[in-house]
Image (cartoon, rainbow, N blue to C red):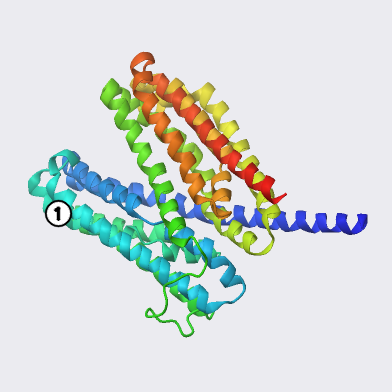
């Protein structure tokens, strides 16, 4: 019994290491694509800025940001539903059930796309002034808001993650940027105005969508998963709680995306635009530090879904610990660099006026490091079927932070926003940890 138990532990450890290496490899593919994309996007941004000038280019950025934010808010995060409910039927070759998952998640994308376009077009026309563009530019903004229908599509994303085709996903951002680079180069040469540049931006989004859908469709056909497929088939997934899961993941992602912009607005409304600028600079640096490690999350979700369908929860917890230690270790090193070299780096890159953001940036980087250490907890909670509990934890933390932030900032200044962010990150991490430990206690 002792020898057999030891052999099983060794096999389990070896399997865990293989999964961990696969997560790192897939993260590397995404990081490579993001790195190439960052260089190309800098090129097309520079071309558009030169062609349009500061004010029109700012309008372009605002219209694009509005569409992106709206897409993030209305999107159903159908890729998570694909992973949660498609991994087991795929593994067991229950093709009919898997095709229902495809139809259901595609329906989610269509519903969120219709809602997003309706809200976007109406808001672009009715609230032109508050959103940053002139009433005369509202029709162009409304036309660009229709790109939300493409932005929200996430079912193909989930399929490619489930099929482990991160190479195709890495190419999507590059395709988008190459189309925009070519269009912006032509626009600079032909001296285009704002309207054609909006078409270029939308064309890039459409090209990325077609790339992703084409890749997912070819992979479905290669695996024989389209046999007998029809869009007229059943859309009902037999597992309980599908709609509850879809709404919970939508709300959870919305909180994470919208709250970032809300805090910046709060700091600006209380302390003025200069302090908001310092906050934004620090937040961008913290986000840049955390970004490579956060790319572990897209690679982590499909592995957790596969482990849940096959190996059970013990392997899921082991993988979560490995990811947390790896991401947290990198984050702590970067926190040390930020603490001791933050001010000189800000002065070198942005100028002397931004050097005062160094101490604020340290708070923000510390909060990011806490998030990196806790990185696998929320995916683990959601993959174990407790998306609603994860949302409740995030809502409680977000509401407490939003209520406490204005009076703290008025009393203690912008540094209080950084300290509060760190406290909120710790509270969120502890809340997710409690959910994980409670689940582990039940299954022990």
Residue 197 visible from this viewpoint: no
Is residue 369 found left or right of 104 in the rendered image? right
Please state the horizontal and vertical placement of residue 390, each as a whole percent of the image. Answer: 50, 45
Image quarter of residue 55:
top left
Q: Position of residue 376 (x, y in %)?
A: 58, 46
Which residue is under mark 1? 140
Give the answer, above or below, for where 49 lies relative to 104. above
- As drawn, the residue found furthest toward the bottom would be 228
Tell me the residue at 53%/21% (across/down): 340
Residue at (38% x, 61% y) in the render? 175
Task: Tell me where residue 304 sits by quadrant.
Answer: bottom right
Q: In the rendered image, which quarter is residue 182 located in?
A: bottom left
**Residue at position x 19%, y 41% in the image:** 131
Q: Secondary structure at mark 1?
A: helix
Percent x, y of residue 117:
23, 58
Instruction: State whether residue 42 appears in this view.
Output: yes
Give me the residue at 47% from left, 42% from top. Answer: 392
Nearer to us in this view, 128 or 311: 311
Quadrant showing the N terminus: bottom right
């Amino acid at each position: 019994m002792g020898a057999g138990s030891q052999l099983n532990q060794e096999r389990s450890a070896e399997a865990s290491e293989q999964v961990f290496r696969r997560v790192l490899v897939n993260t590397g593919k995404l990081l490579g694509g993001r790195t190439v994309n960052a260089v190309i996007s800098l090129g097309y941004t520079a071309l558009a800025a030169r062609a349009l000038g500061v004010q029109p280019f700012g309008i372009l950025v605002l219209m694009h940001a509005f569409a992106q934010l709206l897409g993030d808010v209305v999107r159903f995060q159908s890729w998570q539903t694909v992973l949660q409910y498609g991994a087991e039927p795929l593994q067991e070759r229950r093709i009919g059930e898997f095709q229902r998952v495809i139809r259901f998640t595609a329906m989610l994308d269509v519903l969120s796309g219709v809602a997003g376009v309706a809200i976007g077009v109406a808001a672009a026309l009715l609230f032109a002034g508050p959103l940053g563009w002139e009433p005369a530019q509202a029709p162009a903004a409304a036309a660009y808001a229709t790109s939300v229908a493409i932005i929200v599509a996430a079912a193909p994303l989930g399929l490619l993650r489930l099929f482990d085709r991160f190479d195709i996903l890495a190419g999507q951002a590059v395709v988008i940027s190459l189309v925009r680079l070519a269009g912006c180069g032509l626009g600079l040469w032909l001296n285009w105005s704002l309207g054609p540049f909006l078409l270029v931006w939308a064309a890039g989004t459409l090209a990325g969508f077609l790339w992703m859908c084409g890749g997912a469709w070819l992979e479905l056909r290669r695996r024989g998963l389209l046999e007998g497929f029809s869009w007229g088939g059943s859309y009902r997934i037999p597992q309980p709680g599908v709609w509850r899961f879809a709404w919970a993941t939508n709300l959870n992602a919305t909180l994470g995306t919208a709250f970032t912009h809300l805090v910046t607005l709060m700091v600006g409304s209380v302390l003025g635009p200069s302090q908001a600028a310092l906050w934004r600079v620090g937040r961008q640096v913290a986000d840049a530090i955390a970004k490579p490690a956060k790319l572990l999350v897209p690679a982590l979700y499909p592995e957790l879904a596969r482990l849940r369908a096959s190996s059970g929860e013990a392997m899921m917890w082991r993988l979560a610990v490995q990811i947390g230690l790896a991401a947290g270790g990198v984050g702590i090193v970067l926190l040390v660099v930020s603490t001791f070299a933050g001010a000189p780096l800000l002065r070198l890159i942005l100028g002397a006026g931004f050097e005062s953001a160094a101490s604020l940036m340290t708070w923000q980087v510390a909060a990011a490091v806490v998030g990196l250490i806790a990185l696998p907890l929320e995916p683990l909670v959601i993959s174990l079927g407790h998306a609603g509990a994860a949302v409740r934890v995030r809502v409680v933390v977000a509401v407490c932070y939003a209520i406490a932030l204005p009076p703290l900032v008025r009393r203690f200044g912008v540094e209080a926003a950084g300290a509060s962010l760190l406290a909120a990150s710790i509270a969120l991490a502890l809340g997710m940890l409690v959910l994980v430990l409670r689940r582990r206690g039940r299954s022990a």
